[in-house]
Amino acid sequence: MKERLPTVVTAVLIISALFFFAHRSGREPKAPTTPEEAVWRMSDAAREGDVKVYLNCFSGELRRKLERTVTEMGEIQFKQYLKKVNEEITGIAVSDLEQSDQQTATLRVEFVFHGKTEAQKHHFKLIDGTWRIDSMENGERVKTLIPYGREVEDKE
């Protein structure tokens, strides 16, 4: 019996892991509990082309505009658009969280592309316990000393 115990334990662990991942994949991701998590959820949804989850990252007039865009483009084209734009992004940085009260916050979000970086202020609202992006300011180009992807030269 002692010789079989490791095999039985391993089999139980593998079956449990498979069961867990099979049931987890069908669930919607948990609601963002911080403004930063809302940005990461938006990014993940764009990468996966998940239009429903992407739209749920937004509120207010911005969400209504996005819903109109989905209606005009069609969900399949919008899904492809999300994936294409996300492919162009090589990194995202969030900083400068400002929370004016318990229901609103502002966060600086930088999107890094090959050869350029753009920064935007995202404004968030806490709605039913979930942080959502309520509005975004126009992006500004950030000057970088060495653009992403460029070789660094030694100057001696």
Image (cartoon, rainbow, N blue to C red):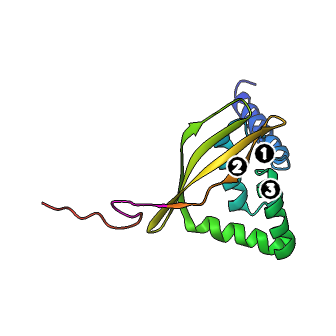
The amino acid type of the residue labelled 3 equals Glu
Q: Quadrant of residue 4?
A: top right
- Earlier along the polypeptide chain: callout 2 or callout 3? 2
- Which residue corresponds to mark 1? 29
Instruction: State which tag comes first along the sequence, 2 or 1.
Output: 1
Residues at marks 2 and 1, CA–CA distance in whole angstroms: 8 Å
Q: Secondary structure at mark 3?
A: helix
Q: Is residue 55 left or right of residue 39?
A: right
Which mark's residue is nearer the viewer, 1 or 3?
3
Q: Tell me how many marks there are.
A: 3
Residue 49 picture location, percent across and down: 75, 64
Neighbour tally class for label 2: few under 14, some 14-19, many 20 plus, Cα within 10 Å: many
Question: Mark 2 and mark 3: span between their CA atoms?
Answer: 20 Å
Disc number for residue 41: 2
Q: Residue furthest left?
A: 156
Q: Magenta stretch: give its range.
A: 141-147
Earlier in the chain: of badge 1 and badge 3, it is: 1
Disc 2 is placed on an element classified as helix
Q: Which residue is mark 3?
A: 61
